[in-house]
Image: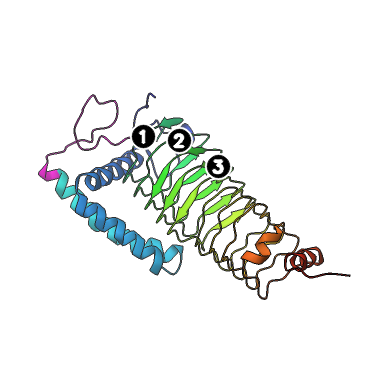
Amino acid sequence: MRPVSAQPAVRRERKQSPHGPSRLKARSLRAELFTDYLRADEPARRAWGAFKQRLAVSAPDLSGYAQIKAPATDVLMAAAERWAARHRLDRLVTPGDGASGNVGAACHPRGMTSAVGEDFQDAVLTDEQWEGRTFERCDFTDADLSGLSTRNCVFTDCVFTGTDLNGSKHVATAFRSCKFERTVFGKSTLDGCSLLGSSFVDCRLRAWTLRETDLTLVGMGKADLRGMDLRGIRFREANLTECDLRRCDLREADFTGARLLGARLEEADLRESRIDADAFVQANLRGARIDTMTALAFAAAHGLRVD
């Protein structure tokens, strides 16, 4: 893979934008310095990751998240600038500079159309817009992708451990066999996306918005999805063991072959959903709303005769 310049040209139509070329360049350098500092200072990196996790739990909404995070980012940025001054870093080392073994060698996807096996750990890529890009076996651990917008992108076997995807929007994007652990999904939206074979561990998912999204073969054991609108979502052969789906709108959802052992479906709306007979025995369905055909399947699963 041959990365292009870390500072792509500003397109002509942006001339009237208040964010001119100099502003964009300054923002890019600031983000890369932030990333370089976190990569070089492990205590700072761990503290920043822990802060984001606590914030994801405590912030009341997206605006609150941003308001609290902004001053903390400024404090860390000041530390990064002091670090750069101590090391006399008057410029950032980027891919293609011919340097090796120096801080700042992390690769940034700006301008790339594809990336294979790249390390984007701790990268700061907020409010990026990616379209038609592919990423394979890339590591986004602890990266800040808040506000990211993707369209028709493909992520295959990528790692998103501790990644901040708060406020991100994804349209017709595929996350295939990706690993999400302690990932922040606050107020993120997936529209017409596929997460085929991906796994989720200790992720806060209740602020998710999913529309026509395919969750076939996903691993979401013990996930908390209470009260979510999951109408028409495909859960085919998904692992939903001990998943909390209480009060969810699951109308027309497809649970064919899904593992629902210990899943909580109390007060969920399951009308017109596809669900195997075994699931009626494995899951807790007290108070769930079902249609006539589903009721007959439930009765048969419990050995009842309907005359």
Secondary structure predominantly adopted by residues drawn in magenta: loop
Residue 182, can we see it? yes
Figure check: 68 above or below 85: below
**What number of labels is visible?**
3
- Circle 2 residue: 135
> Residue 252 in the image: x percent, y percent?
72, 57
Amino acid under disc 2:
Phe
> Residue 17 in the image: x percent, y percent?
44, 43
Instruction: Check the picture and name the quadrant holding the N terminus.
Output: top left
Figure check: 76 above or below 176: below
Q: Secondary structure at mark 1?
A: loop
Residue 232 covered by magenta stretch? no
Which sits in the foreground, 132 or 81? 132
Q: Secondary structure at mark 2?
A: strand
Q: Are marks 2 and 1 in contact (CB under 8 Å)?
A: yes
Extent of the magenta region: 85-107
Residue ID at (52%, 41%): 176
Measured Cα–Cα span from mark 3 to mark 1: 19 Å
Amino acid under disc 1:
Glu
Label placed on residue 170: none
Question: Residue extending furthest right?
Answer: 307
Instruction: Check the picture and name the quadrant holding the C terminus.
Output: bottom right
Which sits in the foreground, 307 or 38? 307
Residue 87 covered by magenta stretch? yes
Measured Cα–Cα span from mark 2 to mark 1: 8 Å
Of the numbered discs 3 and 1, the one sitting upstream in the chain is 1
- Circle 1 residue: 118
Q: Are marks 3 and 2 in contact (CB under 8 Å)?
A: no
Q: Secondary structure at mark 3?
A: loop
Label placed on residue 173: 3
Quarter of the image for residue 268 reads bottom right
